[in-house]
Every structure is written in structure tokens, then in C-alpha cells.
Amino acid sequence: MSNFRTPKTTYYLKRILPFGIIWLVLSWFILLIESMATDYENKRPDTDITMDWSIFFFASFAVFAVGIAMGAVEVLWLGKQFKSKSFGQKILYKMGFYLLFMLVINIIMFPVAASIEMGISIFDSEVWDKFSHYIKSTTFLSTMVSLSFSIFVSLLYSGISEHLGHEVLLNFFSGKYHQPKAENRIFMFVDMKSSTSLAEQLGHQTYFQFLRDYYNQLSDAIIQYKGEVYQYVGDEIVISWKKEDGIVHQNCINCFYGMKARLEKKSPYFNKKYGVVPSFRAGMHMGQVTTGEIGALKKEIFFTGDVLNATSRIQKLCKTYHQELLLSGQLKEALDQKGAIPFKPIATVTLEGRQEPMTLFFPTQL
């Protein structure tokens, strides 16, 4: 049971569940429109299933399950196969795949629904006579059109979610940050080492692919330790946690080590493809930010507050003190009681734009 509740499993469930909800809501909407158009009567009993409560519940469950199945295929497999394609190409190629998939599901589910409607065995000849008429009817065509619409809406949601981020999209839908809110958050600014020389060495196009592979390797650790990607800025990534999520089990520190371990594991791949293995430095800090929607031409969930500027400056001091990770004393105090990784002080500094000095620490992995 504990493995089922891992952050990675929870992350994927949150991404897959909306597909089932989308399919269920659309199916109810389409059913309502069709019922109103036929005055709630079955005018084609030889091809259409007569709707009653047992059929309704079976169809609702079946549609929800099909949506979940599509979501699982999309999130866990097919979505990763077309990452290099444009948004339009992704929609086109996936539509073809899912239409074939839904054709098979449609052919399987209709005889089951027909047997429930007539109260007879699925192997009865009456069921298959009705199925034969259904396959040749306009009802079958309209069903496939409805399925195509559901597939398109699901893929549209998937594409928007991928570009905005699942949590950001849900926050927009829920209106969580429509009014600005104060939050305590942890931030980690991660900056790739020697990025300028790497860009010159690899060339712009190869360096872009290098960055894509680099960020892909970091994603599993971010998910595992409950981080949220706030921004990609060139070769820098900004990761954020709600305070509780970041300090429990020292998730924010373990995320750093998890990303580092993943790059080390993939070092043969990077050496073979690019002749170099990426590495990074990171700065971490915790404090209060104001969170809200911002933008006129393009909406974003935006964080503002001194903690972001301070974290950026802490990250830049990693090179000065020859450390891969530095964190503020404020964050260190919060983490001391939440895990086994100890911390050591390295310097007390006055960051640009701040009057009070800050003691910086680095973790020592056990």
C-alpha cells in the first residue's frame, strides 16, 4: 500500500484522472443532447440501446474507464513518443491511434450493453443481430464522431497541461490564485555549470537538445520529492515547494541529491551523445511570497517577494565558496528537525539589497 502512495504515483494519478472526468462529463452532455433531440424515446430500437438506469450506470462506468485508459496510455507512454513533434502534429498522429483504439472498445462494449438491455446472454443470437445492424447504421457513425470529439478535447487538455504544467492548469481552473495570496515557500535555483562554454562547444542546435535531455533527467527526482517547476530560464531551473512539502523528510535537500544521482546514472549516455556530462549548482532559501495570476496578454501563476532574489544570489555564491549546494540559515533551522542530513556553516554574508547578514550552510550527505 505504501508503494501505491508514492509521490510519483500520486503525480501520475492526478494527471490521468482528469481524462476520465472529461470523458464522463462529455458523454453525459452528448447523451442529454441526443435524448432531447429524440424526445427521450428510442426511435431506432433495432440499432440503438434503450436507456434505463442500469444501462446509464454501465455506460457511465465504461466511459469513465475508457477515459482513464486513454489517460494512462497518453501520460505513461504515447505522450512521450511525440515530444519532438509540433502541437498540431501531435494531435493528428494521436487522433489516428486513439480512433483505432476506440473502434475496438466500441465493438467490444456494444454487445455487452445490448445483452444488459435485453436481459439475455451476450452469446444469444439476438444480441449479435442487433450488433450487425448497429455496425451498418448511422448510429455507429454518430458514436464514432462523438468519440472523436472526446478524444480531441482530451488531447487538447493534455497539450495545454503539458505546456502550462498540470498544477498551474488546475489552479487556473479552480481560480485559486485569482486573488493574490501570501504563502510560505521554499525555492531552489539550479544553474548548470559551464553552460556558456558548453553552448559554444556543442553549437546552438545540439546544445538545445542537450538542455532538453538534461531537464528530462531532473524531472523524476522533482516529482519524487514533491517539487514544482516554477520556471525554466535558459540553463537555469527554479523549483518550488510549499513549506510543509519541502521540509518533510527533507524533501527539498533530497531532491537535489536525487537529481545529481540521476545525472550520474545517465553519464554514459551524455558522454556518448555529447562528449560531456552536465552538472549543476543550487541555492536554496525559504520565506513568504505573494502568489497570484498576472499578465495581460498571457496569464501566469507568479511569485513575488524578496525570497526569490535572495535565493538567486545564494546560488551565485556557490561558485565563490566552491560548493554544489548552499542554503540559508532560515531554511536550515526548519530542516534540522525533519531528517537525517546534517548541515555545516560556511560563511556569514550580507546579500545585495539586504541589510541583515545571513549565515549560509551546506549539507553533508550521510
Image (cartoon, rainbow, N blue to C red):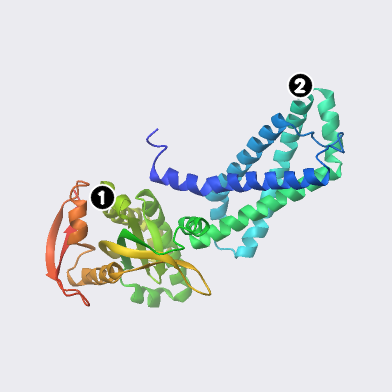
Position of residue 19 measured from the top left corner of the image (x, y, whole percent): 58, 47
Q: Is residue 85 visible?
A: yes
Measured Cα–Cα span from mark 1 to mark 2: 58 Å
Q: Which is more toward the observer, 139 or 296?
A: 296
Residue placed under numbered mark 1 in the picture: 250
Q: Is residue 224 left or right of residue 138?
A: left
Question: Could you tell me which residue is drawn at 29 percent across and 72 percent down?
Answer: 309
In the depicted structure, whether residue 260 falls above or below residue 198: above
Q: Few, some or many C-alpha atoms within 10 Å of disc 1 (few <14, some 14-19, many ≥20)?
A: many
- Quarter holding the N terminus is top left
Mark closest to the chain's N terminus, 1 or 2: 2
Q: Residue at x 37, y 49 (%)?
A: 224
Residue beneath disc 2 = 121
- Could you classify mark 2 by the number of other residues whose Cα lies within 10 Å: few (under 14), some (14-19), or many (20 or more)? some
Q: Residue placed at 39% from the left, 51% from the top?
A: 223
Question: Is 361 on the left-hand or right-hand side of 17?
Answer: left
Q: Quadrant of residue 203?
A: bottom left
Please provide percent x and percent y for residue 45: 86, 34
Q: Is residue 129 left or right of residue 154?
A: right
Image coordinates of residue 97 in percent, x first then y, are 67, 50
- Judge left or right: residue 65 versus residue 350: right
Compare residues 31 and 59 and report the one nearer the observer. Answer: 31
Helix, strand or loop at label 2? It is loop
